Image (cartoon, coloured by chain):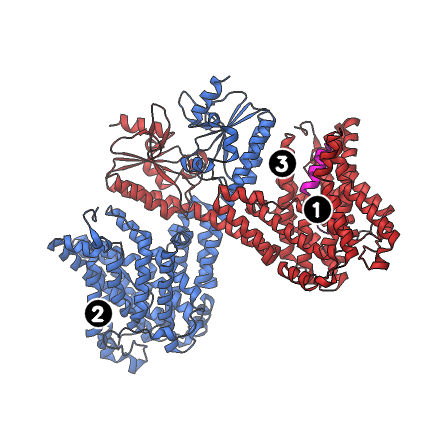
Chain colours: A red, B blue
Amino acid sequence: MADGGASGWLKHFPLLDDLRRASSGELAQDGIAGTITAILLIPQALAYALLAGLPPEVGLYASVLPVIVYALLGSSRVLAVGPVAVAAVMVSAALIPYAGDDPARYLSGALILSALSGAILLAMAALKLGWLTSFISHPVLSGFTTGAALFIVGTQLSSLSGIPVPRDAGSEGIVAALYAGRDQLDSETLAFGLGALLLLFAARAPLMNLLTRIGVKRETAGIVGRTAPLLLVIAATVLSAVFDAHGRWGVAVVGQIPHGLPGLSLHFLAEDGWLQLLAPAALIAVIGYVESISVAKALAFRRQEKVDPDRELLALGSTNIVAAIAGAMPVAGGFARSMVNYDAGARTQLAAVITALWVAMAAFLFTGLLAPLPKAVLAAIIVVAVWQLVDFKSLAHSWRYDRGDGAAQAATIVGVLVDGVEGGLMIGAGLSLLLFLYRTSRPHIAVVGQVGETEHFRNVLRHEVRTWPGLLLVRIDETLYFANAPRVESELQSHIVEARKPKDVVLVMSGVAYIDTSGLDVLEALETVLRQHSSRLHLAEVKGPVMDRLAGTDLLAALGPARVHLSAHDAVVAIRSAL
Amino acid sequence: MADGGASGWLKHFPLLDDLRRASSGELAQDGIAGTITAILLIPQALAYALLAGLPPEVGLYASVLPVIVYALLGSSRVLAVGPVAVAAVMVSAALIPYAGDDPARYLSGALILSALSGAILLAMAALKLGWLTSFISHPVLSGFTTGAALFIVGTQLSSLSGIPVPRDAGSEGIVAALYAGRDQLDSETLAFGLGALLLLFAARAPLMNLLTRIGVKRETAGIVGRTAPLLLVIAATVLSAVFDAHGRWGVAVVGQIPHGLPGLSLHFLAEDGWLQLLAPAALIAVIGYVESISVAKALAFRRQEKVDPDRELLALGSTNIVAAIAGAMPVAGGFARSMVNYDAGARTQLAAVITALWVAMAAFLFTGLLAPLPKAVLAAIIVVAVWQLVDFKSLAHSWRYDRGDGAAQAATIVGVLVDGVEGGLMIGAGLSLLLFLYRTSRPHIAVVGQVGETEHFRNVLRHEVRTWPGLLLVRIDETLYFANAPRVESELQSHIVEARKPKDVVLVMSGVAYIDTSGLDVLEALETVLRQHSSRLHLAEVKGPVMDRLAGTDLLAALGPARVHLSAHDAVVAIRSAL
C-alpha cells in the first residue's frame, strides 16, 4: 500500500506524504496528467456553468480553489474534482424556481447550494450517515444519469438552434417550444452548433482510428483527441470574431468574462431561502458523493489502494464549502475526467494541483479573449460530453438479470424526463427500496439433507441427499427480522406439521446474519410448542455475531449447549448417536 | 391435520367440513365454549362501543352477523372475532375530527370505517399485499398496544369520576381537564366506578386463588371469574334502578337501547368523506389483521393446524364489510377473547356461532332492561380489560435483547401517548424500518478457515482454523444488494489488499440469499480486476435460487464451472489439488 510508511500527521494528508516520497520522474508524470486534464476541463468548466444557468466564469472558479482543497484532503489519488454536468442541471432545476429572473439572486443561490451541499456532506460524516447514500442502487444511479443526460441534451437544443425555449421548460415544454419556434431557427447559430458537434464527434473514435492507422501510438492519439474541445473553442472564437457573428447575424455569444479570480467572500451567508434550497442541496450532495466515491473506489482498487468513504465525505464536504466561499457552483468528482487523469498517468493529487494552476492561469490570461465565443459551441461541448453518460446497455443488462431492478431503472429514466431530476430520483430509490423489502419479507426456506458422504447439507428438492425419519433439517436463507418473521413462522410450522411430529427439528442458520426481537419471539414460541409436543428444537451453524446476541436469552437457556451445534453435520451426528 | 379428508367445495369452508365430521360430544364442547365466550363478550361489546364514542348497541351488532360470517369464511378454528378495544379507540380518534358533534354523521362514519377497512383487507388479498402488514414488528405492535391501552385508561377516567373531559382531548388534555375539573368530582359516579373496578380486579387472581384453595378446579374457577363482568352489569343495573341513581344523583347511565337488531342497510354508502377516512381505515385494517393473524397462528400451531394468512385477509375483509351493512363498528380477532374461547375447549367455529346467537338473544331480550346501567361500570370493564394489554415486561425484554428494537418500542409507546394512535404507529414502524436498513447496509464479512479436520469453515478471528498462503476464503453474511454493495465492495477490496496478492479468492456465499444488479456489478468488477492481477475469483456454497439467477451472466461465463464449488471444502480441495 502506498501509505504504508506514513507517520504522524502527514498520514492524514496523502498528497503531502506522496510528495515527500515521490521521485522527480513521478512528479513529471503528474505534471503531464494535470495538464491534459486541464485541457479537457477548461472548456467543460465554461460549458457546465452555462448549463447550470450561471455565468461561464463560475465554472472556472469551481475548478481552482475547490480542486486544490480536495487534492489536500481527499483520500483518492486520482479523482478529478470540478463542475460536473449532472450536478449542473440539478443546480438549474433548483434555482429557476428560487431566483426567477434575478441574476444576482440566482448566483447567490448557487453559492448557497455549494455551501449547503458541503455542510450536508460534513454532517453526514459527523453523524456517520454515509450509509444512507448507498440507498441509490446502481440501476437507479445509471437510470438517473441517463435520464439527466437526455434531458441535458434537450436543454441544449435551444442554444444549438437559436430557437428560444423558456428556461424552466421540462422535457415536454422543450419539445413544444422547439416545434412552436421552428420558424425562428437561426442558420448561423445552427452552423456553429452543428459544425462543433460534427468536429467533436469526429475527434472521438474516427480520429482515434485514423491516427492509429497511420502509426500514431494509441495513448498519443487519445491525447490529441482530448485537445479537440479546447482547439474548437479557440477556432470558433477566432471565426466568430473575424466575421463579427454576434453583431452581423445576432449569434448568441459568451460576452465579457471578468478577468481573474474573485476574492473570497461570505456574502452569500446573508441571503435568505436556505430552507427552500435544503432539499435540492441534499440531492446534489448525495448524487455528487455517490458518483465521486464509485469512481474513486474503482480507480483505487486498480492500483491496489484503498479509499476511505468517511474521509471522502469530509473531503468533498469541505471542498464544496470552499467552493461557496470562492464564488463557485457545487463540485464533485467527474467520471470521464478522472478516467482521463488516470489514463494520462496521474499518480498523486499533484496532478490536480497542476490542473487547478492551469485553470487559474487561463482565468487571468485568456478570459478577456473569449467574449466572441458562440454559446452554440459550448452547447455542443455539453452535448458530446453528456452523450457518453447515456447508457441503455446498462438498462438491458439490469432487465435481463433482474426484472425488478430493470423496472426501477426504466422508471428512473422516465421519471427524470417527465417529472424532473428530483422526482425521478425519488421514484427510482423508492421503487428499489420497496422491491428489496418485498424480497426480504419472503425468504427462501429449504428442507436440507446430507450430500453423498460429504459433511455438506443441501436442499432436498435440488440435490440427491440423505434424510432421516423423525429428524427435520430446515435452512433459513435470510436475516430473521420483523418483516419476514410472520412468514418464516408460518413456513416453519408448515414444514413441521408436514413432517408429522418429528422428534428433532434442526434450524440451519448459515443464512441468518441477524435475529431481531420479532425473530427471537418466533424461535422462542417454536421451542415452547415443540417442547409441549415432546419434540426438540436444535440450532446449527449459528454465526458468531448472532450467537453473541442470543447469549442470555430464554431461547438459549431452554436449548442448552447440547442443542446448539457448530455445523449441520455435527447436529446430525449428535442427534443420531443419542438415539 | 383436521382437514385431511375434506373434498370438493366443502374444503373451502372449514366450519361446514368440521361439522360434518364432528361427534356430538365435540359439538357439546363447542356449545359450552361459545356460551362462556358470550358471557365475556356481551359486557365488553357494550363497553367498547362506548369507548369508540358510539351508542352501546353498536357493539352488540358487531358481535352477531360479523361473527357468523367469520365463522363461515375464516381458516382459524378458535379465533373469536368481535369489537376490540384498540380498534375502538382508533375509531374514536378518526371520527371526532370527522363528525364533530353530529351523532348521525359519527355513526355513519363508523360504518364507513368498517366498510373501508374491509375493502382494504380484500384489496390486500387480491393484490397479494399481505406482506406489507409484516412491517409492524413485534416490539412496535407491543408498544402500540401498551400505548393505546394506557391512553384508553386515561379516556375512561372521566366516566369513572364524573369530571367532564372534552372528547377530543389528547393525553395532556385529559390530565389538564381532570385537574381543572377536580371540584366537579361526582362521588356517586366514583362509587359505582371504583366499586366496579375493585370487584373486577378481585374477580381475577384473588378470586382464582381463593376458589382453588377451597378445592374448586382451576378451570371451573377460571369460568366463575369470567362471569364477573356480566354479574356486575346485572347487579349495577339493579342497584342503579333501585336508588334511581340517574334521577337522584345525576349519575350518567347508558339510557334507552334499541330493542333487537337493525335491518341490513347500505345507507352509509351515500355519505361523503370516504377519502378523509381512508388513512385511519387502513390503519384499523392493518392493526386488526396483524392482531388477529398472530393469535390465530399461535392457537392453530398448538393444535398442529395451519392458518392461511391470505385466506384470513379475505375472511376478515368480508367480515368487516358485513359489519358495515349490519350497522356495526369494525371488528377483529381479540387476543384475550380467543384465549378464553380456546381454553374453554372450542374446537370449531361452531363455538363462535353459539356466541353470536347468545348475543342476538341478549339484544332481543335484555337491552330494554339496561337503561339504568351506569356508564362508570362499563368504563371499569374497559379499564380492567385493557389493563392486561399494558406490557412493560416486553419492553424490558426487547431492550435487553436489542437496543434498537427496545428504542423503537419505547418510541411507539411515547408516540401514541403524545401524538395519538396514528402518529405513534408511524414513528415506531419508521424507526424499525430505518434500523433494519442500517443493519443490512453494514453486513458482517468474515475471512474463514477450516475447523480442525472437519469440512466446516469458520471465522479466523473466532475459531482455531487452518488457512493457506495465497488462498483467501471470505464469507459474506448478508444478501448482496444495493444498500450494502458499496460497503461489501470496500471490505472485499480491503481483505484482498491485506492478503497481499492472493492467487485464489473464494467467496463463501452461504449467507447470500439474493444478489441484485448492484451486487452483481460488484462481483463482476472484482472478477475483472483480480484477473488483471493474475488472481482467480471462486464462488462456493451458492444457494440454488441465487445460482439460477446467475446463469447467463458475464460473471458466470468468466468463472466457468471450474470456479463454482458446491462447498468451501470442495473449493479448497480443488484449488490445492491444482497447485
Residue depth check, mark 2 versus mark 1: number of the one nearer the observer: 1
Q: Amino acid at mark 1?
A: Val
- Expressed as whole percent of the image width and height from the top left, the position of residue A525 reads 32, 45
Drawn side of residue B327 relative to residue B500, left or right: left
Q: Residue at label 3?
A: A298
* Mark 1–mark 3 distance (CA, rounded to whole Å): 24 Å
Q: Amino acid at mark 3?
A: Ala
Q: From this viewpoint, which residue is outermost toward the left?
A: B24
Q: Is residue A469 magenta?
A: no
Q: Nearer the viewer, residue A197 or A458?
A: A197
- Expressed as whole percent of the image width and height from the top left, the position of residue B399 reads 44, 47
Q: Chain of mark 3?
A: A
Q: Which residues make up the magenta segment?
A: A322-347
Drawn side of residue B554 relative to residue A525, left or right: right
Q: Chain of mark 1?
A: A
Residue B396 visible in image: yes
Q: Amino acid at mark 2?
A: Ala
- Expressed as whole percent of the image width and height from the top left, the position of residue A236 reads 82, 48
For marks 1 and 3 on the same chain, the one whose residue lies earlier in the sequence? 3
Q: From this viewpoint, which residue is outermost toward the bottom?
A: B247
Kindly state the secondary structure of the residue where label 3 is placed.
Answer: helix
* Mark 2–mark 3 distance (CA, rounded to whole Å): 73 Å
Q: Residue at label 2?
A: B360
Q: Are marks 2 and 1 on the same chain?
A: no
Q: Chain of mark 2?
A: B
Q: Quadrant of the C terminus of chain A?
A: top left
Q: Residue at label 1?
A: A384
Q: Are marks 2 and 3 on the same chain?
A: no
**Label 1 neighbour load within 10 Å: few <14, some 14-19, many 20+:** some
Q: Is residue A334 magenta?
A: yes
